[in-house]
């Protein structure tokens, strides 16, 4: 039987406290976790688990990330309303919805057409205005660059150069673009944040171990 809105509303509020307890201090991110209906991004048979802090399967051997991981990557992106953000790996569309809820302009690329179509229809239904396309995200979206932030939601051995090239250079009005990407082998990756500090300069820092599905290029 479908859960009433009230049950999900309470579970969502509880999830915010779980995510906060895991070290997420950015109130704008927590607010977004508290308002996006994660159950809508999950297949019907698993919706009762939507508010556990766990990844869940979304088909085609892919997963919707764990909410605290979504929150952590979003916190590292350090967005402001109006920022232009590129996501690689649309998957269910949940991460894109979180960013939309924070008032940023979201562009997102997914390599599986079926996941793209599903995410597009859920985001439209919930009135989140992200621009999505099917393709190989390792090449970024050159015609829309530069981006204030790029978030990769799949693990990679090497940071794609084309994504670094598409980060905003810092100038008098804008800070340098941020790239948040899990880097490592197939089983474990370190969350890596690269900030563009000039035309040819970048600063990189790492924070914590994660396990993402692989970023597949081509
Ligand atoms: N952000 C998603 C998580 C999806 S899992 C969510 O909120 O649900 C990672 C996704 O990256 C998968 O859907 C996978 O198909 C996709 N992916 C992997 N390599 C890719 C590539 N090179 N370009 C675009 N998408 C890719």
Image (spheres, rainbow, N blue to C red):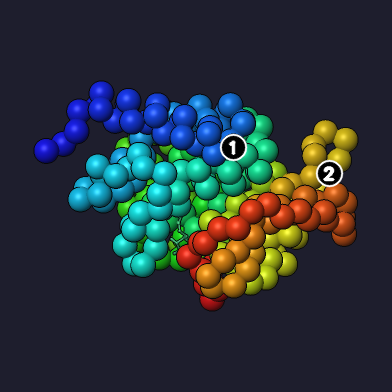
Image position of 39 (left or right of 176): left
Q: Is residue 12 visible?
A: yes
Disc 2 secondary structure class: loop
Badge 2 local density, few (<14 within 10 Å), some, or many (20+)? some
**Quarter residue 28 falls in:** top right
Q: Is residue 140 left or right of residue 174?
A: left
The numbered dot on residue 31 is: none
For disc 1, the marked residue is 23
In the orientation shown, which residue stands out farthest toward the bottom?
A: 218
How many numbered marks have been drawn onto this rendered protein structure?
A: 2
| Element at label 1 | loop
User: Which x, y percent locates residue 42?
Assistant: 31, 48
Whole-angstrom CA distance, mark 1 to mark 2, is: 29 Å
Q: Which residue is mark 2?
A: 170
Q: Is residue 57 above or below residue 168?
A: below
The part of the image, by quadrant, that contains residue 24 is top right
Where residue 217 sits in the image (x, y, percent)? 55, 73
Q: Give the residue displayed 85% in from the left and 49% down from the top.
A: 197
Give 37 or 136, whichever is nearer the viewer: 37
Find out if the beta carbon at label 1 lies less than 8 Å from the nearest ligand 1 atom.
no
Q: Earlier in the sequence, mark 1 or mark 2?
A: 1
Which image quadrant is residue 117 in?
bottom left
Please give the name of the residue rendered at 53% of the width and 34% of the height, measured from the top-left corner.
21
Is 112 above or below relative to 124? below
Q: From the image, which quarter does the C terminus lie in?
A: bottom right
């Amino acid at each position: 039987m479908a859960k009433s809105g009230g049950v999900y509303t309470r579970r969502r509020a509880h999830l915010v406290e779980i995510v906060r307890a895991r070290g997420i201090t950015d109130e704008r991110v927590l607010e977004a976790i508290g308002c996006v209906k994660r159950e809508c991004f999950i297949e019907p048979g698993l919706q009762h688990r939507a508010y556990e802090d766990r990844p869940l399967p979304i088909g085609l051997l892919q997963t919707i990330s764990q909410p605290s991981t979504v929150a952590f990557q979003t916190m590292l992106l350090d967005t402001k309303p109006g920022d232009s953000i590129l996501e690689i790996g649309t998957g269910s569309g949940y991460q894109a919805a979180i960013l939309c809820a924070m008032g940023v302009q979201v562009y997102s690329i997914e390599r599986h057409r079926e996941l793209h179509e599903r995410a597009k229809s859920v985001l439209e239904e919930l009135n989140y205005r992200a621009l999505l396309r099917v393709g190989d995200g390792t090449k970024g979206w050159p015609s829309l660059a530069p981006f204030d932030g790029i978030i990769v939601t799949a693990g990679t051995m090497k940071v794609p150069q084309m994504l670094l090239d598409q980060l905003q250079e810092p100038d008098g009005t804008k800070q340098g673009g941020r790239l948040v990407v899990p880097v490592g082998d197939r089983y474990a990756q370190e969350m890596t944040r690269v900030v563009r500090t000039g035309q040819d300069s970048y600063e990189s820092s790492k924070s914590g171990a994660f396990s993402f599905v692989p970023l597949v290029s081509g």
